[in-house]
Structures are given as structure tokens and as C-alpha cells.
Amino acid sequence: MKDEMLCEENKVHDNIVEKVSGELPKEEIVSDLAELFKIFGDRTRLKILFVLLKEEMCVCDIAHILGMQQSAISHQLRVLKQSRLVKFRKEGKTVFYSLADAHVKTVLSQGMEHITE
């Protein structure tokens, strides 16, 4: 049985390789993107993002919905904020969190669409 992942003929297509090589993002960009996807790789952070997809909320509300300690939610929100996936606003002594922008919603929506096809 042949390995379908290997070329049957060991020939490099120089024109294709040259074109694609010139269009690849810089290593720093690829590294930053890999770090962003790591953020999405944590179940708790994903749950928080899905909660915030529905409504702006404070740490207390998110912790109650997810059945977790506020300190754990606060830690994950800090990571999400540093990654520019969530933003916050203060109202008196309460801090409300929401998704940073429409890009986050798009990533979540397209990810769900992909795995439920």
C-alpha cells in the first residue's frame, strides 16, 4: 500500500515553490498567530468567550454560570485581555467584560461551524 502523503516522483515544482515561499507571512507573525491559537486551546477560556459572546458580564456572573471560583475566572480573563480577545469597562466598582471585537466572534462562529459540519 502506497503512502498517499508522499510524492511518487521526487520533483520540486520551482515555479510553485517560489511563488508560495514569497507569500508566506514572516516568522514573527506566524509565532504570534500560534500564541493566539494557544489561547483558544483552553476549555475554560473558550467557555468564557462563549459566555461573553452572548452578553457583557462581570466576573461574578461568569463564575456563577460556569460553576467556577471567581479567582480562576479572573486569571483567565487577564490572559484573554492580554491577548486582546476581551475588553472591559468599569461601572462604579463593577468591571464588565465583553469580546474585544467582531473578529473574536467570527473565530468562535467559524470554529463551531467547522466542527459541527
Image (tube, helix red, strand yellow):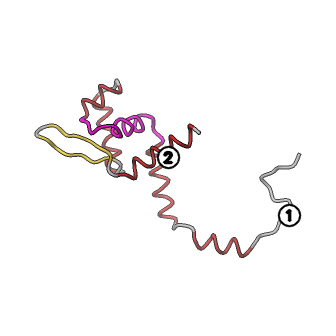
User: Which labelled disc corresponds to residue 110?
Assistant: 2
Nearest the eye: 15 or 56: 56
Alpha-carbon span between mark 2 and mark 1: 37 Å
Tell me the quadrant of the picture where the C terminus can be found: top right
Q: Position of residue 28 (x, y in %)?
A: 47, 64
Q: Judging from the image, what secondary structure is the residue with disc 1 in?
A: loop
Q: What is the crowding at mark 1: few (fewer than 14 residues within 10 Å), some, or many (at least 20)?
A: few
Query: Is residue 50 inside the magenta stretch?
Result: yes
Q: Which stretch is magenta?
A: 41-58
Residue 30 — which label?
A: none
82 left or right of 21 in image: left
Determine whether, in the image, residue 6 is placed left or right of residue 90.
Answer: right
In the image, residue 7 above or below residue 81: below
Q: Nearer the viewer, residue 1 or 99?
A: 99
Picture coordinates of residue 24 (x, y %)?
57, 67
Q: Secondary structure at mark 2?
A: helix
Secondary structure mostly taken by the magenta-highlighted segment of the chain: helix
